[in-house]
Amino acid sequence: MKMSNDSTTHEAPKNAMALDVAIVGAGFAGMYMLHRLRSMGLQARVFERASDVGGTWYWNRYPGARCDVESMQYSYSFDQALQQEWHWSERFASQPEILRYACHVADRLDLRRDIQFHTSVTSATFNDAAKRWDITTDRGDRVSARFCVMATGCLSTSRQPDFKGIDRYRGKTYHTGNWPHAGVDLTGLRVGVIGTGSSAIQAIPVIAAQAEHLTVFQRTPNFSIPTRNRPMDETYEQSWKQDYPARRAVARTLRTGVMTEVNDMSALAASEADRQRIYEERWQLGGTSFMAAFNDLSMNKASNDTAAEFVRGKIRGIVKDPAVAEILLPHNHPIGTKRICVDSQYYETYNRDNVSLVDVRATPIEEITERGVQVDGKVYNLDVIVFATGFDAMTGTLIAINPHGRDNVALADEWEAGPRTYLGLMSANFPNMFMVTGPGSPSVLSNMIVSIEQHVDWIADCVGYLQAHDLPTIEPKREAQDAWVEHVNEMAFRTLYPTANSWYMGANIPGKPRVFMPYIGGVGAYRAKCDEVAAKGYEGFALGSNRATQAAAE
Ligand code: NA7
């Protein structure tokens, strides 16, 4: 491996390393990417800011954190022995169990020897002459890599709104997306939770059971479905394990990458009585499969209204104080167009004497004072404030690293009006830089592990192809990228999703462009497209040649 000669733009390196592939992030994406590349005999190394593997599941340790995909489906499928030996203890796995699984995989595949922890990538610059990425870290590393894989996650830059007065607050503050590893004992404390997204909805019942008093500050009510979590049923587990390869193969062809029974009829085609019965069955079943009660809930507003009204009826039925129930009723977005939440006793929690709800929609939080949160002139005294205020999703982490590509173009500039990718895998002007589950791919609309495996396999195959054909670079052609961005947009606007002010649309970050970021065309169709592109010799991509490289270098 030839090292870059560019020593002028960086400080003197503490150490310098030449790699085939630098991988950023040791979550499920980075871990599998490392495994695949090592198996191909390539020199790969992962840079990870945390102290261990796990990514999203490393950071999101807030009370009640749990996956909303069933545990039998939320694991790697690439290794039959691995999927047979691992035992999930619950229908929906908790964060600690998922993290244990990630650590088990790291041990089993001996991944950690090629992962550098406590290390943030601070810059990544494409060196045009050498056709390599120059990467620096906050530990003083200097890396020259032929390929750079951004396995940086979709929800990895937590966001705390810039509340006036926050620095004056004398109590403790925590963000759900960056929860202390030692845990937090909230016993006997007055706790405030700001936000009512998925994280808050999982955390609130657990915090309420511990705190002396919990005050929830809600700006937008959300739809939530009971999880109906339970210990793993052995017969159910065995039914999966006996049929794992076949079921995994099916899941890869489905819209969400999750095997769920989809009721293939319009909500409007059912009689009122049947519709209510079907919703009730789904409500009792629990989990996100509620949205598969009919086939047009994300497409047709009238159909969606029937599901939304069913859930509003449930909220009215569960919450005893009608005034509190009224505040909790979601009205400003179609159900499912913001990520549907799943919960254990969320609405029931508002029946507790030690829980109060403050509506901050009409009267927003004014400031954080020394003692608590001020709304409409009133200060709510709090010992602890929990920010469950979400993430700069999908693009936040990439733009923070801000890779510089060909001709020193910055990703932040290229994506100023919203992310632009071809297949969510690469961006024009950033040769040899891959993204795992990047914007423009199904990513957050799918079972993340299914989508991660698909991307990692595609990237590994692509790297193998370039090697076999002695091609130094690959990058999307501008016209292919433009057409894909348009297709992603067109598919989104066929649905109700863009009508919500969601983080899918970038709407939770002031100033962020309003673009629907994930690809909604479905995991199966998307995979077929990626496979077809590869089979056609990477159609839509420009493949460099060594001759061109030499000519450029001369
Ligand atoms: P979300 O879903 O983005 O939720 C963030 C919540 O914080 C949401 O209720 C926001 O209200 C609220 N928020 C944000 N800023 C404010 C201010 N300034 N005042 C009051 N309330 C505020 O993040 P999560 O972590 O819950 O979930 C992210 C994903 O993780 C989830 O979708 C799953 O895929 C897993 P808003 O709706 O903006 O009015």
Image: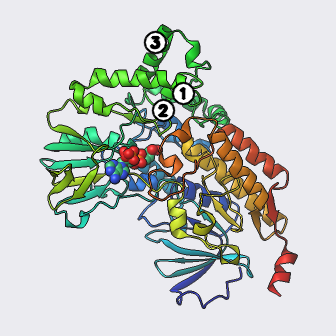
Q: How many angstroms separate mark 1 from mark 3 (CA)?
A: 20 Å
Q: Which residue is mark 1?
A: 301
Q: Earlier in the sequence, mark 1 or mark 3?
A: 3
Q: Is residue 31 above or below residue 288?
A: below
Q: Which residue is mark 2?
A: 334
Q: Quadrant of residue 318?
A: top left
* Callout 1: CB less than 8 Å from ligand 1: no
**Mark 1: which amino acid?**
Lys
* Callout 3: CB less than 8 Å from ligand 1: no
Q: Secondary structure at mark 1?
A: helix
Q: Is residue 203 above or below residue 6?
A: above
Whether residue 43 appears in this view of the structure is yes
Q: Which residue is at a point 70% across and 77% down the rendered structure image?
A: 407
Q: Which residue is mark 3?
A: 277
Q: How many angstroms separate mark 2 from mark 1 (CA)?
A: 7 Å
- Say if mark 2 contacts mark 1, CB within 8 Å: yes
Whether residue 95 appears in this view of the structure is no
